Image (spheres, rainbow, N blue to C red):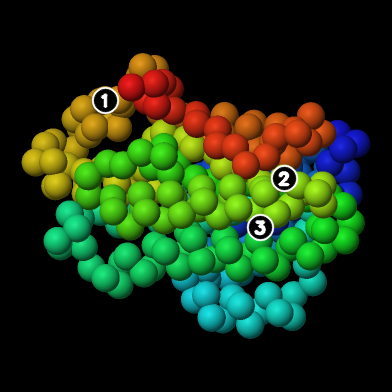
Amino acid sequence: MDSFFEGKHAVVTGGASGIGLAAAEALAEAGARVTVADRDDDGARRVAERIGGEAWVVDFSDTEALERELAERPSDVDILVNNAGVQRMNPVHEYKAEDWRLLHRIMLEAPFLLSKWVLPGMYERGFGRLIHMSSVHGLQASPYKSAYVAAKHGLEGLSKTIALEAGEHGVTSNCIGPAFVETPLVRGQVRDQARLNSMREEDVVSQIMLAEASIKRLVQPEEVASLVMWLAGKDAGMVTGSSFPMDGGWGAR
Ligand SMILES: NC(=O)c1ccc[n+]([C@@H]2O[C@H](COP(=O)([O-])OP(=O)(O)OC[C@H]3O[C@@H](n4cnc5c(N)ncnc54)[C@H](O)[C@@H]3O)[C@@H](O)[C@H]2O)c1
C-alpha cells in the first residue's frame, strides 16, 4: 500500500492482458481502485475480481458507441492509462483501409475521447495523471506498420497538447515508449513478420525485434508497469509532455 495511491481511481484500458494487466495489478497493489476496461469480457472480469477492482467491458473500436457511453458514465477518474491496442502489418500499398481505420479508432480516437471524458473532473479536483502507452513507434518508424506508427505518433501529439493545456490544473500527460514487450500482442506478430520479411518464425525475435536494441531481450510487462507507477506517483508532478522510451537502446541510433 502507498498512501498516495490509496482511494485514487485508475482506469486502465486493455487491462485484461499484457502491459495493461501488469499496470492494473501494480496500481491495485498500491491501493488504487482500478477499473479494468477491455473488450475481453472474461479476461476483464477475471482480472478485476483478482485485484479487487471493477470490470468495464467495452470495445474501443466502436468510437461512436464509446462517445455515447462516456456521456452517461461517471468520470471520477484520477489516473487514466490509455493502453489498449492491436497490430496489423502490411506494406502501405496493400494495407487495408479498414485496418488503418480500426487501429486509429482504438489507439488514437478512443484515447482522445477518454481524455476528454476525464479531464473536466481532474481540473475540478486539481489532480490527474494521463499515461499513454505509445511505443518506440511513437517516435520512429518500421516497415509494414504504417497505421500503428501513424497512430502512435498521433498519440504522442495528443499527449503533448494535453500537457500544455492541463499544467495549470495539476494534471500531467506523458507517453511511454517500449520496444518489443513479451505479451500476446508481440507473440501474435511473429508469423506476420516472418511472412513479410521472408524468414523463419524462429529468427524473428533475434533478427527483427531485437535488431536495433543494445540490450538483446524483450521488455517485460512488469518493467513497463513500474514506469507507469512512477509517472502516476507523487514524485512525477513536474513531469509532463514527455516521452519515456524503454527500448534497450534502440533510440540511441
Ligand atoms: N507488446 C509490445 O511489444 C508493445 C510495444 C510497444 C507498445 N505496446 C503498446 O502497449 C499496449 C498494450 O499492448 P500489449 O502488448 O500489452 O497487448 P496485449 O494484446 O497483451 O493486450 C492488449 C489488450 O487490449 C485489449 N484490446 C484490444 N483491442 C481492444 C478494443 N477494441 N477494445 C477494448 N480492448 C481492446 C485486448 O483485449 C487486450 O486485453 C498497446 O497499445 C501496444 O501498442 C506494446
Question: Badge 1 is on which residue?
Answer: 211
Q: Which mark is residue 172?
A: 2
- Horizontal and vertical percent position of residue 105: 45, 68
Along the horizontal axis of the image, is 135 left or right of 126?
left
- Horizontal and vertical percent position of residue 68: 63, 82
> Circle 2 — which element?
strand
Which residue is drawn at the image coordinates 60% and 53% (left, top)?
161
The image quarter containing residue 187 is: top left
Q: Amino acid at mark 1?
A: Ala
Q: Amino acid at mark 3?
A: Val
- Horizontal and vertical percent position of residue 240: 67, 40
Which residue is drawn at the image coordinates 41% and 56% (left, top)?
151
> Circle 1 — which element?
loop
Q: Which comes sooner in the sequence, label 1 or label 3? A: 3
Query: Between residues 78 and 150, which one lies in front from this camera angle?
Result: 150
Q: Is residue 171 visible?
A: yes
Whole-number angstrom distance, CA of label 1 to CA of label 3: 34 Å
Which residue is drawn at the image coordinates 22% and 49% (left, top)?
144
**Number of numbered discs overlaid on the protein picture:** 3
Whole-number angstrom distance, CA of label 3 to CA of label 2: 21 Å
| Pointer 3 residue Cβ closer than 8 Å to ligand 1 | no
Tag in front: 1 or 2: 2
Q: Is residue 42 visible?
A: no
Question: Badge 3 is on which residue?
Answer: 36
Whole-number angstrom distance, CA of label 1 to CA of label 2: 33 Å
Q: Which comes sooner in the sequence, label 1 or label 2? A: 2
Query: Between residues 109 and 99, which one lies in front from this camera angle?
Result: 109
